[in-house]
Image: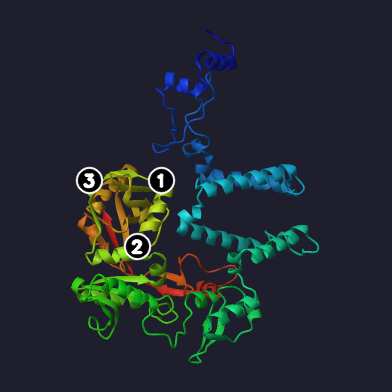
Amino acid sequence: MTFGQEAKFVLHLNEAHDISDPLSLYLEVYHKGSQPTCHCSNQCIAKLPWAGWKKGFLSSYARGHNARIDSSYHDKDKQKEMARKRSEGYASGKYAVWNKGLTKDTSSKLAVISSTISNTLLEGYASGRLTDWRKLAPEKAIIAACKMSETKSRLYASGELVPWNLGLTKSSSLALLKSSDSIKKNYETNPGASAKRFKPEQVTAIVESIGKFELLDDPACYRNKYHKLRLKCNACGQIQLKNLMMLIGSPVCFSCAPKESKGQLEVYDFVRSISLDAVLSSRDLIAPKEIDVLVPSAKLAIEYNGLYWHSAANISNKNYHEMKRKLVEEAGYSFFMIFEDEWRDRRHIVESMIRHRLKSRGEILDARKLRITEIDNKTAANFFEASHLEGHAMCSSCLALVDSSGRIVAAMSLRRPFHASRASASIEVARSACLPGITIRGWIGKLTVAALKKAKSQGYESLVSYVDARIGNGKGYLSAGWELESMPRTPRFWWTDFHDRFNRFKFKADKNSGLSQFEVANDAGVTEIWGCGNYVVRCS
């Protein structure tokens, strides 16, 4: 039979042959049953859009993916020229934004668009179909946030940007009134929101509920949870500065608190449950310096660093921990240092790392019996958040070892190095880890071979990785064929409010305000906390 119209052909398929999906028949006839995928890369799995039986697949690319191959947006000069023409067009009135001056309240079209977008996003996040990229790439998110902040500060300072509510009040602006009522309702009905910014009476109530301090400052002066208040210890009378995050997280007086912190005692109890010869606060190894937990039988020295006592507020020498590490290793012991927040928030990972160093291993696997697969960024993020001490880092690709049940037991992620000198020739191993509680013989070697093969197929000459000296010495890499490129040098540092640590990119100098990095950090109520340096290893 022949048909002049495709609609009649589709109707015939349905009525005469009980085929309700003409695409499946088209794929069976012309594409061996499988729908072709986008040609933008070998890894792209996006399906090509089908234009019907008559036209078939009109493009070799999924919608928008052709820009990855052939686009003027790859040309920096063309980008600048297009941006200039757009700016001139809007400035001259040649172009105009269709929704200028409109709001959801005055435009039914905007109301429908806003509702659709909101519902789609809420459904996506609730179902897990969507994931906030900032959670997948916290380091990248911090850098992006800093750049946005600097750009906005510059534009506001120059007058190019003006706050939309400049000169408006709740009585003169309906939008401001709605916003104010919404914020007030949120604080009154959502207990979690009130923790962001307390009322003066709440500040007083928090101090009184802890019962160890007297608040000397007027609670009306309180600005935010990082604002330091003067507190007087009820036991020793010592006056000290604490913000509410410190007070809630560590409600102790730094003058009369016990020598060993609660966290250090917990680490000691855990280690001693495995090795009975563990010693608390030992000065025998590198006298007169003290080791928090020493295990002679395993030749292991463990340091537990509280975020207050080991910050720049108490230790001015940034090389203190690096020097201590060197002394320990010169004495023939391995060094393992953890921070208070790591023990508190990623305890299962820390315990697994300690067990491994004490030869108290759980499940043991052989890498040769595991298969290698490439996993997507979301799967990699979930794995490293559960298995790596520093969580996930944004990556360009990630290789994993999978056991017979399909469980991911180890992974190695790759990314372009931050250091420009290494960016052209090497690709960096951003994260590598085993699942906590599992020992895999030969896993680094097997993943290295696969990663190096992938790197060279993309034009790179070698792999490079950084090993934090406070938790390792790189021997695992060296035994897998890597070479040591450099020893630890400048120690790493973070910012801390004595309750959490923050990436060093979070607080940067504000050139527009003339504030140095340390002035910005001080205004935010944070200070430096130093660790050890990095071993740099390379494989080619």
| Viewer-nearest of discs 1 and 3 | 3
Q: Nearer the viewer, residue 228 or 83?
A: 228
Number of labelled discs? 3
Q: Say whether disc 2 or disc 1 marks the residue closer to the N-terminus.
A: 2
Q: CB of mark 2 within 8 Å of CB of mark 3?
A: no
Residue at 59% of width from left, 87% of height from top? 216
Q: Say whether disc 1 or disc 3 marks the residue closer to the N-terminus.
A: 3
Snapshot quadrant of residue 466: bottom left
Q: CB of mark 1 within 8 Å of CB of mark 3?
A: no
Q: Which residue position is annotated with label 3? A: 369
Q: Which residue position is annotated with label 1? A: 376
Residue at 60% of width from left, 66% of height from top? 191
Residue at 23% of width from left, 62% of height from top? 475
Residue 349 disc label = 2
Q: Say whether disc 2 or disc 3 marks the residue closer to the N-terminus.
A: 2
Place of residue 134 in the rendered image (x, y in percent of width and height, measured from the top left): 50, 55
